[in-house]
Image (tube, grey):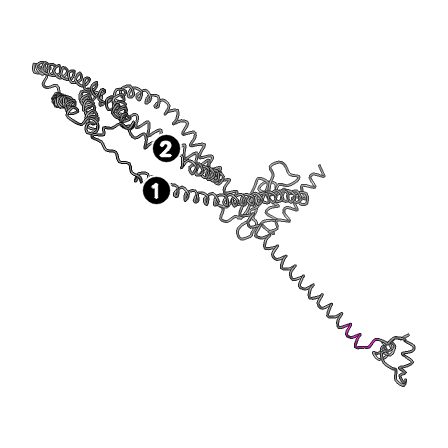
């Protein structure tokens, strides 16, 4: 039974879209029978066109989504590649950093051992130096006492400057707040630097220890040199003792002259004051002449001693007794004159103390505001220039402190921003380190599984070794058979040309020498060689 496809006209006639041939259309009967008008062909075509356009739009949207998905996949692939590169770079950097740290630790250990040995040796030297320094300190006590006396005199002069110092101390409190903020900012900077420099602490400690050791060595050398210099100049100090005593007297005389001249014009004016100071000045002039004479006499004695020391032992004889007697007589006279000068200096010191007490009393009167209306006139200024200058200085100081505070605030803001960036970088570094650790764990697990699978499948446990210094060899592979004795192994070298060469071992040169010559040297088939060894070991294992 044959079937043919109806034509388009027959299909349209069946649907009632057109009138069959030889048949007159009866529109009224069709309307009456149908009740509603039939769909027109153009409406059906319009519906189909609308459906087609909707499908085209849907297809375009699907294609667009497919392109977007492909672009997203490409971006993801690029991101994965970039992350893998970063992980590899971080792995290389971590290995380099670990190697560098290990080298630094070894170097520091060696340095610490050396420093310990040098420190043990330096302890004895320090003890000796300490003893010598204590001896020198005992000898320097006399000089320090005179120096302290001079400082007491200077402190009495500084008592006049107490009001100015109080004003400075009052203004010092203004800078305390700025200094506290500066200290806080510096502490935060130090914490940040400590966080950023945690990896280099070992190196810094080593350098500091080395510097400390060098400083100790230099201090020991200086102490030894000072001790030797003190030992060499011991005799010279004995000869210069009289000169130092004269210098002390000169300084005391200068101090007394300064005190007298400072209060002479202000508090000791008039005929009475001149009459009271004239004897003191005369005594000072007499003391100065005496001291100058003593100084010249001591210089003559020192020149005589130098000439005597330069003369050596050739002048020993009767002349030595005469010169010794003359020197003793001169020394006795010098000692007597020095004692007289010391007594005179004591009297002048007592008088100076009395004058100082009188000057303090006069200064107290001036501080209370006492004055002589007949000789003194007091002017009260309505606008004090000193107060204006102080106010201007205070304003300038406040402006400077405000500008410093603003600069510190900006620095603090920058430091806080840097801390945020550092924390972000640390978090990202930790994430990368965790990812790197996970990749290493997965890599080790996969390698272990691969080695076990190769051992179970082929009967050989394979180990790979590389030597970067080898020029002709890319890698070396060691194969340990499954059923062989302990220590039996096959070694192959992968050359730069891509050829795999058999390395002679105890196994290949002994029991397997013939098989190696047949399979490897003659037929160039390493798989046949390893397979033959596997079968041979299996037969031996099953037969035994």
x and y, in percent, of residue 385 in the image? 30, 40
x and y, in percent, of residue 221 in the image? 31, 28
Most foreground residue, 461 or 23: 23
Task: Estimate how packed mark 1 is, as few (under 14), some (14 to 19) or many (20 or more) residues with alpha carbons within 10 Å.
Answer: few
* Secondary-structure class at tag 1: helix
Look at 38% across and 31% down and name the residue there.
212
Residue 116, image quadrant: top left
Residue 401, image quadrant: top left
Question: Which mark, residue 468?
Answer: none
Judge left or right: residue 188 versus residue 376.
right
Part of the protein shown in magenta: 39-48
x and y, in percent, of residue 10 in the image? 86, 79
Above or below, 5 against 106 in this view is below
Q: Is 58 within the magenta?
A: no
Judge left or right: residue 145 versus residue 468.
left
The residue pinned by badge 1 equals: 392
Task: Estimate how packed mark 2 is, as few (under 14), some (14 to 19) or many (20 or more) residues with alpha carbons within 10 Å.
Answer: few
Q: Main secondary structure of the magenta part?
A: helix
Rendered-image quadrant of the N terminus: bottom right
* Secondary-structure class at tag 2: helix
Mark 2 and mark 1: Cα distance apart in space = 18 Å
The residue pinned by badge 2 equals: 169
Q: From where the camera sits, is residue 231 visible?
A: no
Most foreground residue, 324 or 512: 324
- Please count the marks in the image: 2
Above or below, 74 against 132 in this view is below
Most foreground residue, 99 or 53: 53
Most foreground residue, 234 or 38: 38
Q: Are marks 2 and 1 in contact (CB under 8 Å)?
A: no
Rendered-image quadrant of the C terminus: top right
């Amino acid at each position: 039974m044959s079937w043919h496809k109806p034509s388009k006209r027959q299909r349209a006639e069946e649907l009632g879209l057109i009138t069959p041939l030889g048949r007159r259309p009866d529109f009224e009967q069709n309307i009456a029978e149908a009740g509603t008008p039939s769909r027109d062909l153009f409406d059906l075509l319009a519906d189909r066109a609308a459906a087609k356009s909707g499908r085209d739009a849907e297809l375009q949207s699907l294609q667009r989504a497919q392109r977007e998905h492909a672009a997203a996949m490409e971006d993801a692939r690029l991101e994965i590649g970039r992350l893998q590169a970063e992980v590899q770079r971080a792995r290389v950097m971590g290995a380099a950093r670990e190697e560098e740290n290990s080298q630094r630790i070894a170097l520091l250990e060696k340095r610490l051992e050396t420093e310990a040995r040098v420190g043990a040796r330096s302890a004895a030297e320090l003890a000796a130096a300490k003893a010598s320094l204590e001896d020198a300190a005992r000898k320097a006590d006399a000089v320090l006492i005179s120096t302290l006396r001079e400082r007491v005199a200077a402190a009495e002069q500084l008592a006049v400057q107490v009001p100015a110092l109080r004003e400075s101390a009052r203004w010092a409190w203004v800078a305390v707040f700025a200094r506290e903020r500066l200290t806080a900012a510096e502490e935060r900077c130090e914490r940040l630097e400590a966080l950023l420099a945690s990896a280099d602490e070992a190196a810094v400690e080593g350098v500091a220890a080395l510097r400390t050791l060098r400083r100790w060595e230099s201090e020991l050398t200086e102490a030894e040199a000072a001790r030797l210099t003190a030992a060499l100049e011991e005799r010279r100090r004995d000869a210069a003792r009289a000169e130092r005593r004269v210098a002390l007297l000169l300084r005391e005389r200068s101090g007394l002259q300064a005190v007298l001249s400072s209060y002479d014009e202000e508090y000791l004016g008039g005929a009475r004051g001149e009459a009271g100071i004239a004897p003191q000045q005369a005594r000072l002039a007499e003391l100065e002449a005496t001291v100058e004479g003593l100084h010249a006499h001591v210089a003559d004695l020192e020149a005589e001693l130098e000439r005597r020391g330069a003369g050596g032992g050739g002048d020993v004889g009767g002349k030595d007794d005469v010169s010794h007697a003359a020197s003793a007589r001169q020394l006795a006279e010098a000692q007597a004159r020095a004692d007289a000068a010391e007594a005179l200096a004591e009297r002048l010191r007592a008088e100076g103390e009395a004058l100082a007490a009188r000057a303090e009393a006069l200064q107290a009167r001036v501080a209370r505001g006492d004055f002589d209306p007949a000789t003194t006139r007091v002017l009260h200024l309505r606008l004090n220039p000193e107060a204006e200058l102080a106010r201007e200085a205070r304003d300038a100081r406040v402006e400077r402190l405000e500008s410093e505070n603003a600069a510190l605030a900006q620095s603090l803001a920058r430091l806080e921003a840097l801390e945020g960036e550092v924390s972000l970088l640390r978090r990202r570094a930790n994430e990368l380190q965790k990812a790197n650790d996970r990749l290493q764990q997965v890599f080790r697990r996969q390698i272990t599984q691969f080695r076990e699978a190769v051992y179970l499948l082929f009967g050989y446990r394979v180990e790979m070794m590389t030597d970067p210094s080898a020029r002709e060899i890319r890698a070396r592979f060691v194969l340990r058979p499954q059923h062989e004795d302990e220590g039996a192994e096959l070694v192959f070298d992968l050359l730069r040309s891509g050829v795999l060469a058999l390395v002679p071992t105890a196994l290949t040169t002994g029991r397997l020498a013939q098989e190696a010559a047949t399979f490897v040297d003659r037929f160039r088939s390493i798989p046949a060689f390893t397979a033959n060894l596997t079968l041979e070991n299996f037969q031996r294992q099953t037969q035994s």
